[in-house]
Amino acid sequence: MNYNIRASRREDMIQVLELIRELAVFEKEENAVEVTVADLERSGFGDDKLFHCFVAEQEGDIVGMALVYPRYSTWKGPIIHLEDLIVTEKMRGSGLGTALLNEVVKYGHKLGVKRISWEVLDWNEPAIEFYKSKGADVKRDWDVVHLDEKGIANYLTNI
């Protein structure tokens, strides 16, 4: 398959959002996406950039993406978090996921991070096996904890 992986540009965010929505459908959360193109443009570009995004382009279409952002581990130091690695359904099995993960790992190495972290749904066995095959340690004994907007508001009313 012929594709090009590069850093995203502001004008890619329309297609990036389409990929995010495709992932939400795959993860059975199609109504959960709240982010907009304007949010992605504001957060991914400019002086206060919150994330870095790689896109895979094929014949002018964005067919994959990987979005990372900086974090800090009190045990290890600087790390990056891979929020999502998305390959459109028609490109799955083409090696594109590996190519995107390669870019993320090279980027993290260039930054000098101590770790790259991400989550994977426990029912997504193909993704889990993919990550394991790349040498990732899938921590089955950790639970992800979220405090959403409503939870934050409720929390604040009780302190």
Image: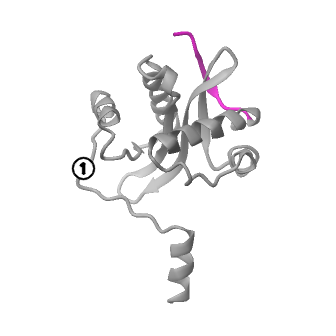
Point out residue 106 in the picture as x, y percentages from the top left corner. 48, 28
Does the magenta-highlighted stretch encompass residue 2?
Answer: yes
Going 37% across and 52% down the picture, which residue do you hit? 76
32 lies left or right of 122 = right
* Residue that protrudes farthest toward the left in the picture: 141
Tag 1 secondary structure: loop
Point out residue 109 in the picture as x, y percentages from the top left corner. 46, 33
Does the magenta-highlighted stretch encompass residue 115?
Answer: no
Going 49% across and 50% down the picture, which residue do you hit? 29
Q: Say above or below: 84 vs 96.
A: below
- Quarter occupied by residue 57: top right
Point out residue 129 in the picture as x, y percentages from the top left corner. 28, 32
Going 47% across and 55% down the picture, which residue do you hit? 72
Q: Which residue is mark 1?
A: 140
46 lies left or right of 157 = right
Point out residue 90 in the picture as x, y percentages from the top left corner. 51, 21
- Residues shaded magenta: 1-9
155 lies left or right of 118 = right
Amino acid carrying label 1: it is Arg
Q: Say above or below: 154 vs 10.
A: below
Going 32% across and 28% down the picture, which residue do you hit? 134
Between residue 97 and residue 103, name the one nearer to us.
97
Crowding near the residue tagged with mark 1, few <14, some 14–19, many ≥20 C-alpha atoms within 10 Å:
few
Q: Say above or below: 113 vs 71.
A: above
